[in-house]
Image (spheres, rainbow, N blue to C red):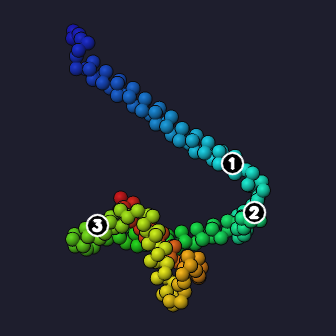
């Protein structure tokens, strides 16, 4: 009859397996606790924001979302213009960035082009990704916006005041959409290529 000692390989494997099972269980509970705390923090943040915003919601109601007025003197505020501009400029950016990003992802991940061209294109996309979004935004204001106004409405559309930099709403939305497309473009090929 073979006796198993405390130091046999079989008993060592059992203790390692038990230890691994215990570590897996502890890690599973740690992840559950962290996931639950993330959701709890998100709910808490929503509650704090809602609590602090409740006086404004009571005073302005839903007219805040449906009104275009923004007058600090008479304390009337409406965000419809800003909501509309955000939706339209984001849609323009998506309509530009998704097809271009998909094309770049296909070109850089497949063998359509020689390796030197693919690596150069991937390098340029990575360089664009390295530019901070603040710089891209300022480029949009001071370079892209005047170019959009000049090409669409002639050189008379540009005047000295910041508000009159792009007097036409369509030119402003187009420039904003193009600028957002440039900001988001480097992220599409990376996520689509994977």
- Residue 62 location (% of width, % of height): 75, 61
Is 148 positioned to the left or the right of 85 in the image?
left
Earlier in the chain: of badge 3 and badge 1, it is 1
Task: Classify residue 13 as left or right of residue 83.
Answer: left
Per the rendering, the mark at residue 95 is none
Disc 2, SS:
loop
Compare marks 3 and 2 and give the one earlier in the sequence. Answer: 2
* Image spot of residue 185 (x, y percent): 41, 68
Q: Which residue is mark 2?
A: 75
The picture places residue 188, in percent across and down from the top left corner, at: 41, 64
Mark 1 nearby-residue class (10 Å; few <14, some 14–19, many ≥20): few
Q: Can the viewer see residue 93?
A: yes
Label pair 3/1, CB-CB below 8 angstroms: no
| 167 on left or right of 32 | right
Residue named by callout 3: 123
Secondary element under disc 1, as helix, strand or loop, is helix
| Cα distance between the residues tagged 1 and 2 | 18 Å
The residue at 69%/48% (across/down) is 52
Q: CA distance from mark 3 to mark 2?
A: 51 Å
Question: Of residues 86 and 106, which is closer to you in this image?
Answer: 86
Q: Is residue 58 above or below residue 43?
A: below
């Amino acid at each position: 009859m073979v006796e198993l000692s405390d130091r046999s390989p079989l008993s060592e494997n059992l203790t390692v397996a038990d230890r691994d099972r215990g570590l897996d269980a502890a890690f599973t509970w740690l992840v559950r606790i962290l996931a639950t705390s993330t959701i709890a923090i998100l709910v808490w943040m929503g509650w704090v924001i809602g609590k602090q915003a409740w006086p404004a919601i009571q005073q302005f109601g839903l007219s805040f979302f449906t009104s275009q007025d923004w007058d600090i003197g008479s304390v009337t505020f409406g965000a419809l213009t800003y909501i509309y501009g955000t939706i339209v400029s984001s849609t323009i950016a998506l309509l530009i960035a998704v097809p271009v990003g998909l094309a770049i992802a296909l070109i850089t991940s497949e063998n359509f082009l020689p390796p030197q061209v693919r690596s150069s294109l991937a390098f340029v996309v990575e360089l664009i990704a390295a530019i901070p979004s603040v710089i891209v935004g300022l480029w949009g204001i001071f370079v892209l916006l005047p170019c959009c106004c000049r090409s669409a409405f002639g050189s008379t559309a540009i005047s000295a005041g910041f508000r009159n930099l792009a007097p036409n709403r369509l030119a402003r939305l187009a420039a904003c959409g193009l600028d957002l497309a440039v900001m988001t473009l480097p992220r599409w090929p990376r996520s689509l290529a994977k």
